[in-house]
Structure formats: structure tokens, C-alpha cells
Amino acid sequence: MTQDVSSLTVKALKQICQTHGVSVSGKKSEIVQRLLEIGLPRSLLGLEPIETSSFTEERETLQGDQESEEEISIDDDIDEDSTVNDNFEFSRTSEVEDFENTMVLDAEVIDAEIIEAEIFDTKENQPIKEKVSESATTHWTLTDQLKNPKFSAVLITILLAGGGWYWYAASQIEPFTPDALRYGDRMEYTISNGGLDVSGEFVDIVVEQLNVDEEICRLRLAFSGTGSTSVTQGDANQIANEGLSDDLLGVVRTKGGLGLDWLAVEKKTTMEMSTLDIQRHSISSIPGSTACSDLSVGGQGRASLATTSWTEIGERDVLATQLDWTFELDDTYRQGQVTSYGVGGLLGAIESLLPGIAMVLNPIELNQLLGDDLIETGVSGEKLGWVWNVLGPDEIGGTQMFKISAYHEEVRDLCLGYANIIFWVDGDSPWAVQQEV
């Protein structure tokens, strides 16, 4: 079975995709398959021609006449493997199994000839006895070879090596390009050991909504719960009577800050904090002091947050952001709604000053932060003020993923503190699978 493993780089394959109008997203194997489906020749894609040899033919060669003119060179096999090894990828489990079978089969044929040569040389050094059949000394069956201890030892070694390579290759994560979000995408997640320590303007935003008289200068939160994030799938009524293309199916109609109608992408994020512990710090009671006190007053409760944002489909500007919240602390229950129009969202001037800072409050959209870059070990980039670097593969829940670190450069440069994120990604989710802020 021929495997569609291209010797071309991902960048070269993407250029071919752009030339023929084919999507460039997905894994390398998926890009190759997509180009094959539109009829491009295998040679153009850096693929080997399809071979027609079968397991039956090779087994007959093993058991047939050893004087056949066909020769198998170990050196040739090694050279071929070393050429392809750097770009070797698995895209399906069945392909891995075919690869394993091919390795074992080649090992049997090669080793059979090697062992036979050694035995033949040994017999040349022994006295020639009379009435010894020529066929008995030159024709060895597979059963005879398996009975030979030296042959069995070599074969077992190759099988173990092949099995080790199969385990190594099957357990590695393939490089991939993040997919953009699609209408109807949804992800649910769990929040565990959540913590937030805020001060300055961040506290002012919260205090304004709570409408409390206390002069709070710092808030510390510890929480856990569940959440979800999704992209709304708008129906045909949203674009009815506008003569618009069906390509826009999925958008929703909303109003901007001036009351005008816009077609936009609607995203929703919910967060249910089943446990919430709040510690608040006030300005020091020492006369004339403006320092934030180390003493805190706290309480326990729960909270619910639901955020909806609308992004214009043309310029991709944020039209509006709405937050619906409920808050229950001890015997106090509060609820409210906050709506913000334009760039900056709920964080207002802070988001305008530090673009992308709101990313610490939501699951990371991979395409938004990483773009169309191929995700593999050592790759780095910068977007929305975040500098990110792919640290390498890491196992999460028994699954291999890429571990990525990111920090907000402007927060550091403006001496406002620091904002760091560690998150894990794979090619099956458009969002980070796990993240630590």
C-alpha cells in the first residue's frame, strides 16, 4: 500500500493550494489528500508512484527459488528511509498498521538472505561429504530458517525495533494549522482552581457595576465551575429580502452604537461559578495614606456570567459587547447587564490601550492568536500584543498535544505587571484545550 507522504514542505503545499483555489487549513496529510482529490499528479505533490506489489508475491519470493535474479539491498532500504524520515507523518491509524506490516515483511526477506549467506560460507569451510543432495544445501524453507537460532535472534530484534518505531510514531502529534471558527462551533469546559488578583483600573470596572460605597483598591477571587463558548448559527431569516449570497448564511443581524443595522458574527461565552471566594482590600485607614491595605474582608458565594459579542463581518470590528451577570455573596444578591459599543468591549479604555488583554478572561481562539502558522515545536510569533512560543509536545489526559506559552508584551513594557498564559492545543479543536492564566 502506498502512503501519501509528500517530500514537499508545508509552505510549498500551501502555495499549490492557493494556486488552485484549495483551502490551506488542516494537517499536512489533509492538504495532500485535498490536492489529490482535484486531480493533481502525484509527482507534482512530491509523492512516490503507487506500487502494485502484494504480500502474496513477496511471500512466494521468500519460499521460491533462492537463485532468482531479483536482489534486495539493505543499503537501498536504509537510504530510502533516511530520506523520508524527516517529513514522515501519520494521518490515519490504518496507514500506521500498513507501515508496520511492510517493515516486518521487508525484514523477513532481507534477513533470510543474510542468514543463508552466513550458513553457506560456514559450510564451505567444512569437508564435503559424499551423497549430499545439492538441493538440501542450497534451498532453505522459511520453517528451516526459523529453526536457526541466529536467524530467530535477528528477526526478533527487528520486530522489536519495528514495534518501537510504530509506538513512537503513533504516539506523536502532527504539526497542524489552526482552523478558523465556523458557525455552530461550540465547546464546553471546566474551571478548576481559578484565581484572579486585580487592582487599579480593573477594580474600578467591577466597583462601578456593584454600586458600593466602599473604596476598594484590590480584589482577590478564587473560583471553580463550568463554562461554554460558541459561535451562533444564524438562520436564513437574517439575510432574507436582501439579495445576499448563501455564503453569508450563519450571520446575524444586530444594531451598532448609532442604531444602524449590521450583519455580524455572534459569539457567546457563559461561566457558572459554583464556588466563589472574594477577598477585597480597601485604602489604608492611616490618615493621609493612599496605600492599599494588606488586610482584607471576604465572603463566599456564587456567580453567573454570560457574555455576547457581535463582530462586523467586513472590517471585523467589534460592534457591541453585552454582559449579563448575577452575583450572590453571603446574604447579598445582585444582578445586572452591561452593554458596550465599539472597540474595547467591556474593558473599555484598557482594551484600547492594551489590545488583546481580554483574552485572559476567555478560552483562546487559536486562529485569532496564532493565525495560519504551522504549529510545531520551536515555532513562535506575535499577534494582538501577545508573544507566543511552541514549547513542544506534552501529554494531557493521555493525549499528545502542543504546549504553548504566551505573554503580553505591552503589559510588561508599560510596567503594569505581567500577563502570562500557558495553553495546550491540538488539531481537532479551534480553541485551546486547556489553559492556565
Image (tube, grey):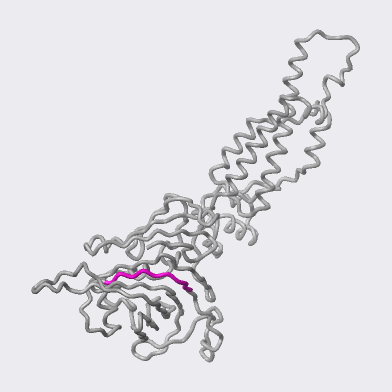
Q: Residue at x 56, y 62 (%)?
A: 20
Asked whether, in this view, residue 398 is left or right of residue 312, the answer is right
Q: Residue at x 19, y 69 (%)?
A: 293
Nearest the eye: 276 or 413:
276
Nearest the eye: 389 or 192:
192
Main SS class of the magenta portion in the image: strand
x and y, in percent, of residue 290 in the image: 13, 72
| Quadrant that contains the C terminus | bottom left
Q: Residue lying farthest right?
A: 131
x and y, in percent, of residue 330 in the image: 35, 80
Q: Is residue 66 one of those drawn in magenta? A: no
Q: How many marks?
A: 0
Residue 36 visible in the picture? yes
- Quarter location, residue 347: bottom left
Asked whether, in this view, residue 233 is left or right of residue 412, the answer is right
Which portion, as a residue range, is magenta? 219-228
